[in-house]
Each structure stands twice: as structure tokens, then as C-alpha cells.
Image (cartoon, rainbow, N blue to C red):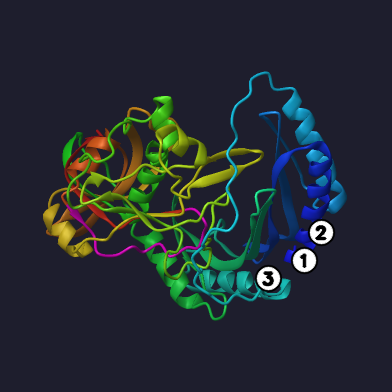
Amino acid sequence: MTREQFDLIFEAAQAKATALGAQFDIYYSGGESISAETFRDELASFSAGKDGTLIVRATVNGKTGGAQSTCATPEEAALLIEKAVENAKLIEKSEQTLYCKGGQSYKETEKIPFEMPSAARIKEIAMNCRQAAYASDPQISDGTSGGAYAGTHEIFLYSSEGLRLGNVCGSGGAYIYSVLEKGEDKRDGMKSCHDLTAPDYEAMAKEAKEKAQEKFGAGLVKSGSYPIVFEGKQMQQILSTFCSCFFAREAQLGTSLLKDKEGQRIATERLTLIDDPFYKGNPMQIAFDGEGTPTYTKEVIKDGVLKTLLYNLESGAKAGKPSTGNGGRGSSSIGTKVYNFYIVPGDKSREELFKLAEGGIFVTQMKGFHAGANTVSGDFSIESEGFMIEKGKKGAPVKSFTVSGNFFELLKDIAAIGDTIEDDAPGFSKIRCPDVFLPSLSVAGI
């Protein structure tokens, strides 16, 4: 989709909306994608294509309806306006729908060059990953795979209120997933990269293999309270699970314990939490949200104090506050979203965190958040794997233990924060975290 093509789509929608006396906006999200994955010595899957979704909201007589389609043409846009108006008439209660006004100032995104690779190149990278994985160790077994992917993403948002916004970007990556086998025991490890120009296949394979190797011989943990170091990727999972508690709409509905907490201390003074649509080095940046509001970098928590919840136009109006530029577009409804939501790194290396957590556990895998976490109360009880911390270093592997706690208490109890965020994956909505140290958490083992 080009801007010129979307201009024609908007013109058709605008003509129909004018005829029907409707206020409206029209949103397009789509792009091109290519991916390939291997199994054993051949390609197991390959896909390539273009897709997109056209979403319309239309308001007549104080009632708003929506409609969407995967057919993005001027003719379809006009039909969607008709459908949205028809849907609006079915609504019994009138409610004010807020549309973002045009003519606002938007920050420039970082210009990160990206050239969509050919399908042949994606297949080549996937097979090179596979070859490097199998060459890395004689214990590599079936289940090992290599993969590569790339895609462009286009967003356009125009409205009867003067919005004329567009954003086009792209990203790609490759990965090696290695499975090692010793007797009847199998262990896995994974390593990815996000530079398709010259992936270091041997380095990726070596790290994936080492991650699998170190898991062999995992023992069990006795139940008790332990010092815990959460690997950044595991803290990322925790924050992702409870991310919605920072949404103003959830607080207004009574499903977030952060209701009426703005301006109050909710975490350790060591913790600063930022939402950044312009995260440096991320190619998936965007200067406007799903409603057209300008986005900006904001401190959600600053030195432990909750500075702001995240608002869209509707939740902001209910609170008497402006939108924070966090309106998320989903079908014809407006929700709330984060961009690059991250804990600011601290001043401790991983080794320094291990010294603080002597006799504790380094948690490197957690699974089952969908069943083991209550996003309202903040309670969690998650099956985990990791390593004992012995003499200030990563020691013996351990498995099949459960870490339990409460997210809101965890924010207060973080005693030290790692100095590095290892996850550099691109994305419009990403959670990023360094390692964190907690002096004590409940662990259920044997």
C-alpha cells in the first residue's frame, strides 16, 4: 500500500461519509512478509505474502459503528462506511466518540534503513542456520531447526477531522533452535539475531548449543524462600503479564490495583519504568497511536513513584487528562497499548547480582503465565527452571520448581537491577527488562 493508493481509498470513504452525514476515520494496517524454517536437512515450511486490514469507524447522531475488511480498495472503503453507519443505527445508547484532530505536531522517527530481502535469500539464511546448528555438536538431534523471516509494515490513518498520517517500516531476523540428546535426555537452547545482512551463523549455533548443554543433569530444589535473580527475559515475561495494570481504562473499570495511585510510591526507588515509541535502534518506531494522537517518551514510574497511567482519548477524557498517545487499534474498537515498555538498567553486572544472591536461584525459564497469574490481584505461581547460585556464580541446573509471589510487592522488593538489556528484537509493542535481584521469594520444590 502506498500513500497515493490510500489517498484514493480515503476519497471514496469520505464521499460516502459526506453523503450519509457521518464523522469517520479509516485505518489501514498491513504489509509484506517472508519466512522459512527447516527440519532435519530440508525446508519444513515457507511462506510469503501480502495482507492488510481496513478498519472504519463512523459516527451519526451520537452513535458510532465500526466495520472492517481485508479488501483494501476504494469500493470496499465506501461499503465499509455504509456498514459502519448501519451498525451505528443498531446501537441503543448514544455515547460520545472522540476523534483526534488534524494539524498536530509529530516527532520524527529514527531513520533505520531496511531493504526487503528476496525469498531466495530468506531460504538461504534458514538453511545456513540449520547447517551451522548440525555442525556445532555431534549430539544435535531431531527437533533442531533454523529459521529466517522479514517483513514490512504499513499503517495509514486518515479522518474527517483532518488527520493524514502514515508510517512504513520493516525488520527481519534469523534464529537457531538446537536440541541436544544424551541417552534419553534432551535439552534445548535458542539464539536469534536481527541483522540479515551478515548473520554470524557459527556464533549463533555455539550459543544455542551451550544453552542446551548447560541444562543437562538438572536437579530438584527443596521448598523454601530463596534469593532470586530473574534473567531479563523472565522479568520481561512477568512485566508483560501484568502490563495492563498500567492502563487507565483498567483502573477506571476497577480491574487494576493502581487506581488512584498516580503520584504515589508503588515501587522501590531503584525502579524507573519507561514507555518509549522511539526506542533507540528499534526499526519499528511510530509517531502516532491508533487514534492519531502524537506519541512521546514517558516515565510511567520514576524512582519508584507512579507518574502516570497510560491513556487513550476516552480514558483520558474520563479522568480529565489528555491522552498519553497509547491508544491501540483493534478491529473497530480502541484499546490501550505500550510501545517499548522497559525497566531502566541499573548499575550491577550479572556477576555482581549473583554475589548478592549467594545460595539463591537464577531463574532462566518460566512457563504457564496464562494459568498461573492473576492480573488483577498481582499474584503469580509459575513453573520454572534455572541454576543454583554457588560461590557467586551460576552453578548446577535445577528444574521443576515453582516461583510464587505478587507483582505489586515484587516492584517494591527489587533490591538491585542489572546493567544490560539483552533483548534487541524489533517491534511496535515490546517489553524489555534487565536482570533483577530479589532478596527472597517463595519456591516450591521437593
Give the residue type at disc 3: Lys
**In what quadrant of the picture does the N terminus appear?**
bottom right
Q: Nearer the viewer, mark 1 or mark 3?
A: 1
Is residue 27 shown in magenta?
A: no
Q: Secondary structure at mark 3?
A: helix
Q: Quadrant of residue 174?
A: bottom right
For the point 45% across and 49% down, which residue is it?
338
CA separation, marks 1 and 3?
32 Å
Disc 3 crowd rating (10 Å Cα; few below 14, some 14-19, many 20+) is many
Residue 223 vs residue 273: left or right? left
Residue identified by numbered label 2: 8
Residue identified by numbered label 1: 4
Give the residue type at disc 2: Leu
Disc 2 crowd rating (10 Å Cα; few below 14, some 14-19, many 20+) is some
Residue 313 vs residue 387: left or right? right
CA separation, marks 1 and 2?
7 Å
Which label's residue is closer to the chain start, 1 or 3? 1
Expressed as whole percent of the image width and height from the top left, the position of residue 211 reads 38, 61
Q: Is residue 378 above or below residue 152?
A: above
Q: Nearer the viewer, mark 3 or mark 2?
A: 2
Residue identified by numbered label 3: 123
